[in-house]
Image: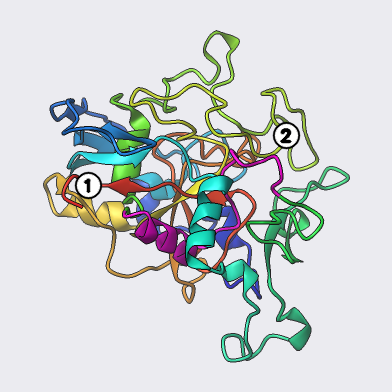
Amino acid sequence: MSRIIFTLIAVVSFSAALPQWLDAQEGSSAFAPTVSNKPNAPGKAPQGMVWIPGGEFSMGASTNGHGMNEMPMASNDAGPIHRVRVDGFWMDATAVTNDQFEKFVKATGYITIAERTPTKEEFPTAPAENLVAGSVVFAPTDHEVALTDHYQWWSYVKGANWRHPLGPQSDIKGREKYPVVQIAYPDAEAYAKWAGKRLPTEAEFEFAARGGLSGKTYVWGDEFRPGGKWMANTWQGKFPVKDAVEDGYAGIAPVKSFSPNGYGLYDMAGNVWEWCSDWYRPDYYKILVDKGSAANNPQGPDSPFDPAEPNEKKRVHRGGSFLCNDQYCSRYIVGTRGKGEVNTGTNHLGFRCVKLVSE
């Protein structure tokens, strides 16, 4: 999906057309225990980061639906469940915030993709009136709608960018501790390089999100609201008409608004989707399983492919967002996956960084 054509399947990350093998994953629901490496951190933590010990774990989610309109359940590209080993690493305790990203911009003069005017060379078939800087924004509908046409709640908004997440009428004043959004993949990559870090692989993200647990539905356990407590920023009410705000937050919440997971990481489910470094392919887990042994620090496939949009280059999203709900998208389930065209940001997409000891 390009930011001008904005074929929004790439943004909302659903897989309507799936290869046949995804419907028959024999034995894929069996999780084995997580075997963590020694938990002691190798020295003082970099500012704002926590130590993730690494180890071997079962990656993915039990898949019994197509990830759309049959929720809550995992999407079919989240299987087969497979064994993976990752080395220990440091990870940002929270998603990168507006004030952190602003420091990067002030230090480097960086201009995000959403702030750049698209060119005719980039989009030769786009009408001239569409060649305006902006990004993709969610807006609730004013009445109940069928959940088969996401264009009803997503649109390309002129002037939407990280400083103005919902368009030129919005800003981030007073939202310094909120996750930065409207960030395309190259923007996140540029920040990470400046900070002396990098973006996490999908395997690193999931290992960290599980917090040492194995086979749980959510990053905190199997019950969505243990003891009636909200554990993540998600959507309540009728989607996409009205968020009932039962969890206390309409839209994005400040970082650290909900309890951390077992590794001390915040918002590894809900709030905002987060970029991972892997190219997206729905069959990548099957490729790993066919190799016959636990994958060691998998980096993702060599090239992207999404059968829904084969010409678009997509990277993996993880974690779900404040828009996830049990009516349409429950990607706050740990192990589930999202995807997005690399040059497209949205107002529910951010990132966090990692750093190896040797980096």
Residue at 83% across, 48% down: 141
The quarter of the displayed image where residue 272 is located: top right
Q: Position of residue 258 (x, y in %)?
A: 54, 24
Relative depth, front residue between 254 and 246: 254
Residue at 56% across, 54% down: 102
Q: Position of residue 33 (x, y in %)?
A: 21, 25
Quarter of the image where the N terminus is located: bottom right
Q: Which residues are magenta?
A: 172-196
Q: In the picture shown, does residue 5 fall above or below 32?
A: below
Q: State left or right for residue 78 relative to residue 288.
A: right
Q: Position of residue 123 (x, y in %)?
A: 61, 86
Q: In the picture shown, does residue 155 fall above or below 237?
A: below
Q: Residues within 10 Å of mark 1 (few under 14, many from 20)?
A: some
Q: In the picture shown, does residue 226 fall above or below 198?
A: above
Q: State left or right for residue 300 relative to residue 345.
A: left
Relative depth, front residue between 274 and 293: 274
The dominant secondary structure in magenta is loop
- The reply to whether residue 26 is visible in this rendering is no
Q: State left or right for residue 135 relative to residue 210.
A: right
Q: Name the residue that disc number 2 marks.
A: 250
Residue at 30% across, 39% down: 46
**Magenta segment: does it hold 182?**
yes
Q: CA distance from mark 2 to mark 1?
A: 35 Å
The kind of residue on which mark 1 rests is: Leu
- The reply to whether residue 200 is visible in this rendering is yes
Q: Name the residue that disc number 1 marks.
A: 356
Whichever of labels 2 and 1 marks the residue nearer the N terminus, that label is 2
Q: Nearer the viewer, mark 2 or mark 1?
A: 1
